[in-house]
């Protein structure tokens, strides 16, 4: 995937892409969170993280494209507002789905935080790598190591 493609992927997952007729808009990360939009899709989360990985240098640069950051922040903010906040748009999610969403946006948020701070890839993507290894113990260990 190229940088341009990665930016496009993020724009669809955040529902900020103006091409609302493209199925990626409706079936992207935020699009799936709208009421009655169906099940969560882990592949959407992975696409977001792999796009961020491709754009890691752009997110660590001294000058950053505002739209790139806005796409990522939109994913985080809309997920929390719509699906986790009391009275959110999508009240049909189970507690398990809400926990999964919080895990995903937490990983996205931490990755963005560390990239903006100039951390190297190993630190920035540590939680994501632990998630891929499916180990909550590893996630806790990663957080503790960063604090030290």
Image (cartoon, rainbow, N blue to C red):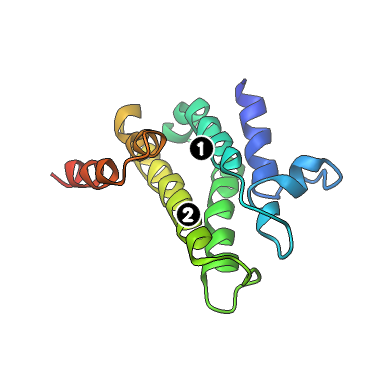
Q: Which one is nearer the viewer's eye here, 5 or 130?
A: 130
Question: Which mark is nearer the camera, 1 or 2?
Answer: 2
Look at the image and tell me in which quarter the C terminus lies: top left
Which residue lies at the image location 48% right of the left edge and 54% below the top edge? Answer: 100
Q: Residue furthest right?
A: 21
Q: Residue furthest bottom?
A: 87
From the top left corner, tell me how far across and down residue 52 is, in percent. 51, 34
Q: Quadrant of the N terminus?
A: top right
Query: Can you tell which mark lies on residue 64?
Result: 1
Residue found at the far left of this picture: 148
Give the answer, above or below, for where 35 lies relative to 30: below
Residue 56 horizontal/vertical position (percent) = 46, 30
Identify the residue position indicated by label 2 in the image. 100
Q: Is residue 63 above or below residue 77?
A: above
Q: CA distance from mark 1 to mark 2?
A: 29 Å
Which badge, 1 or 2, comes first in the chain's sequence? Answer: 1
Find out whether the residues at labels 1 and 2 contact each other: C-beta distance under 8 Å: no
Indicate left or right for 65 with 115 as reference: right
């Amino acid at each position: 995937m190229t940088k341009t493609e990665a930016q496009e992927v993020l724009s669809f997952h955040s529902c900020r892409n103006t091409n609302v007729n493209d199925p990626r808009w409706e079936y992207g990360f935020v699009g799936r969170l709208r009421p009655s939009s169906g099940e969560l899709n882990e592949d959407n989360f992975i696409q977001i993280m792999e796009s961020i990985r491709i754009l890691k240098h752009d997110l660590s640069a001294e000058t950053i494209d505002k739209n790139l950051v806005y796409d990522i922040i939109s994913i985080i903010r809309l997920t929390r507002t719509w699906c986790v906040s009391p009275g959110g748009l999508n009240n049909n999610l189970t507690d398990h789905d809400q926990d999964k969403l919080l895990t995903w946006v937490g990983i996205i948020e931490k990755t963005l935080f560390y990239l903006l701070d100039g951390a190297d890839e190993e630190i920035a993507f540590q939680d994501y790598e632990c998630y891929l290894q499916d180990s909550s113990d590893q996630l806790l260990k990663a957080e503790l190591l960063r604090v030290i």
